[in-house]
Image (cartoon, rainbow, N blue to C red):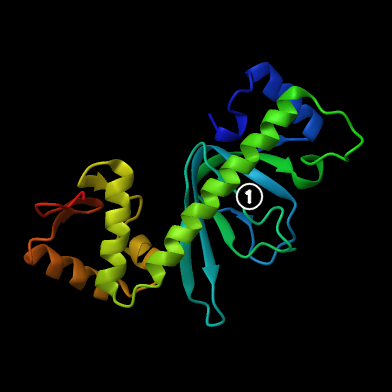
Amino acid sequence: MSKLFHGITPAEGRALMERLGGYTRFFRKGETLIQEGQVKRNIGVLLDGLLEMFETDADGRRSMVGFVRPPDTFALVFAFAEVQRHPATVVARADSSVLLIPLDRILPPSDVDIMPAHRRFIKNLLAVTCETSWKLRSRAFILTRRSTADRLMTYLRERMHAEGSPEFDIPYDRQGLADFLCVDRSALSSVIGRLAKKGLLSYHKNHFVLKGPSVLT
């Protein structure tokens, strides 16, 4: 269940979505949900499937923003910002079902009485927005690292602490990880191999183990 609906019963959620004009859409693999530069209209909750978010520079190079997995929310951080158009493209990487909620119905006029579930929804919305902003801040910190090795290890350490274990999976294949870190794929593969030879990590595909006597400190 999406964190947007924490403390809201299924019946309350259905009534709330009817009032807010929320609706479900199905997107086939490869279909674009949001095009970079498109005018903002909805926030989304992924019910099933997999979405990819990326930005494109002036030369057509793509920079990975991240993946969306059920029941994650997307297009949220920019929803209420002073930004009129989406900065990223969102594409379905698998057949996907999405709940779309129109922005103009979420925050009612001050003179309108709202249902208790709507108040809880707005409170949850603020919490999820702050959590998403923190994740974006973490990625910005990773990208300030100067070398590919520093970016990789900073990211892997963050994943390790999030999982509470030095052994974990990451949600990217090699190209996806290179896009996320904004580095060249071949250079990244070389760095991973070099760090493994130094005994700092071991890996198999997207499974990593960080090594060292105080790795979790």
Relative to 100, residue 91 above or below: below
At horizontal 66% and vertical 57% (from top left) the residue drawn is 78
Relative to 176, residue 57 above or below: below
Relative to 18, residue 99 above or below: below
Q: Position of residue 62 (x, y in %)?
A: 48, 71
At horizontal 68% and vertical 17% (from top left) the residue drawn is 11
At horizontal 22% and vertical 42% (from top left) the residue drawn is 165
Name the residue tied to disc 1. 76
Q: Is residue 74 left or right of residue 40?
A: left
Q: Position of residue 70 (x, y in %)?
A: 49, 38
Q: Nearer the viewer, residue 97 or 211?
A: 211
Q: How many marks are shown on the rendered structure?
A: 1
Say whether residue 167 is visible: yes
Q: Is residue 27 left or right of residue 50?
A: right
Q: Position of residue 171 (x, y in %)?
A: 35, 50
Specify the amino acid type for callout 1. Answer: Leu
